[in-house]
């Protein structure tokens, strides 16, 4: 997907460029800065010294040396002084300038740390909002894969209120149960007063209204009346919303190549996360989302925590896919996109 939050060591990222949250001297320090210098080797320090430092909000590029990345983009984030001293504008400039440098070098992928959120003291939730805002705005007009790399669990935190609201919604709606077909058959059989033994359940097919077989003579007729496919419904909804294809797949955090496969194959079956991502991009209601999911062979379930979190955002009409992904990440769920 074009923008992904990952838990990893940024010095091990296999990308074209990594961003270093540097200090103004560019001569290394603690945290991410020190880790990058140690992993790259002394030649990185020598090249940095030749650059003559870097001002807050600006970005400069060096080679990656011993790192997997070809380039290191060094940017100096602001020190948090309460928020009234222009820190947000300076932090936004760090992301914009770093992405501009990546474009100039022809990078197809770049990995960021959460700039200024360590020793510089920028509140993590505010730093995260700036990162997501600037990266998502950039990806609306450019094709690049961007990673926000989180090293530890406590590095990323959505706002405490949002976390509490989602947790309450999960507590109210999440039903943790296993609904495989054997259990469903057993439950129905028990209700009818003739529960089979575990051995019989594992060996025998027990018919129910969910799994009655269609008569062979009706199969041809049913196939001739196939419903609208996922691909056709998606393209129809894009037209009805007056959106461009590129606007839709970028808002869905889906790669252009994947969207092309969906457009060109009427029978394409996306993953569940991709189908939901398009529903979010199109700002569909909960009912419309469920209909689009059915076209891909999926459904939302209260026995799936991922589904409950997605439902929370749709019910609250919050269709910012990157904010949804922040929440999914915070609850250890897979992210939306393709």
Image (tube, rainbow, N blue to C red):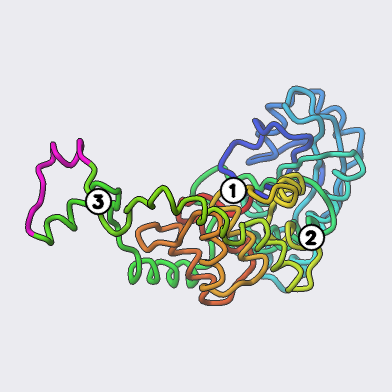
* Residue 122 visible (yes or no): no
State whether residue 243 is above or below residue 118. Answer: below
**Which of the two marks, 3 or 1, is nearer to us in this view?**
3
Residue 96, located in which quarter of the rendered image? bottom right
- Callout 2 touching callout 3 (CB < 8 Å): no
Nearer-N-terminus badge (3/1): 3
**Which of the two marks, 1 or 2, is nearer to us in this view?**
1
Residue 245, located in which quarter of the rendered image? bottom right
Q: Secondary structure at mark 3?
A: loop
Task: Look at mark 2 in the image and give the residue it sits on.
Answer: 245
Q: Secondary structure at mark 2?
A: helix
Question: Of residues 191 and 2, which is closer to you in this image?
Answer: 191
Q: Looking at the image, which residue is at 13% across and 36% down?
A: 199
Q: Looking at the image, which residue is at 75% across and 65% down?
A: 87
Nearer-N-terminus badge (2/3): 3
Q: Secondary structure at mark 1?
A: loop
Q: Report the Cα–Cα distance between label 1 and label 2.
A: 18 Å
Left or right: 88 with respect to 310?
right
Q: Residues within 10 Å of mark 1 (few under 14, many from 20)?
A: some
Tell me where residue 180 appears, x and y as whole percent.
30, 48
Q: Residues within 10 Å of mark 3 (few under 14, many from 20)?
A: few
Tell me where residue 60 appears, x and y as whole percent.
87, 43
State whether residue 314 is above or below residue 35. Answer: below
Left or right: 175 with respect to 258?
left
Q: Report the Cα–Cα distance between label 2 and label 3.
A: 44 Å
Q: How many marks?
A: 3
Q: Which residues are magenta?
A: 193-204
Q: Which mark is residue 207?
A: 3
Task: Look at mark 1 in the image and give the residue it sits on.
Answer: 269
Q: Residues within 10 Å of mark 2 (few under 14, many from 20)?
A: some
Left or right: 228 with respect to 210?
right
């Amino acid at each position: 997907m074009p923008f992904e939050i990952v838990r990893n060591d940024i010095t091990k990222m296999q990308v074209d460029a990594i961003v270093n949250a540097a200090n103004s001297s560019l001569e290394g320090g603690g945290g991410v800065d020190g880790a990058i210098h140690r992993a790259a080797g002394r030649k990185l320090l020598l090249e940095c010294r030749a650059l003559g430092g870097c001002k807050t909000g600006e970005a400069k590029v060096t080679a990656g040396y011993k790192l997997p990345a070809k380039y290191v983009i060094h940017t100096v984030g602001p020190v948090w002084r309460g928020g009234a001293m222009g820190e947000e504008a300076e932090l936004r400039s760090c992301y914009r300038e770093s992405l501009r440098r990546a474009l100039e070098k022809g990078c197809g992928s770049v990995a960021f740390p959460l700039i200024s959120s360590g020793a510089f003291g920028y509140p993590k939730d505010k730093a995260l909002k700036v990162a997501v805002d600037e990266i998502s705005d950039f990806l609306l007009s450019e094709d690049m894969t961007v990673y926000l790399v989180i090293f530890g669990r406590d590095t990323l935190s959505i706002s405490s209120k949002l976390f509490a609201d989602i947790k309450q919604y999960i507590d109210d709606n999440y039903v943790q149960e296993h609904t495989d077909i054997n259990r469903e058959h057993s439950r129905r059989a028990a209700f009818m007063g003739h529960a089979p033994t575990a051995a019989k359940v594992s060996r025998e097919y027990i018919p129910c209204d969910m799994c009655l077989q269609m008569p062979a003579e009706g199969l041809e007729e049913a196939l001739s009346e196939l419903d609208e496919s996922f691909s056709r419904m998606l393209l129809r909804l894009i037209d009805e919303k007056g959106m461009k294809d590129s606007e839709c797949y970028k808002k869905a955090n889906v790669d252009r190549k994947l969207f092309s496969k969906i457009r060109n194959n009427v029978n394409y079956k996306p993953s569940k996360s991709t189908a939901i991502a398009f529903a979010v991009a199109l700002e569909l209601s909960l009912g419309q989302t469920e209909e689009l999911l059915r076209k891909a062979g999926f459904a939302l379930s209260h026995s799936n925590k991922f589904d409950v979190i997605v439902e929370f955002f749709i019910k609250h009409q919050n269709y910012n896919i990157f904010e949804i992904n922040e929440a999914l990440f915070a609850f250890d769920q897979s992210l939306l996109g393709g």
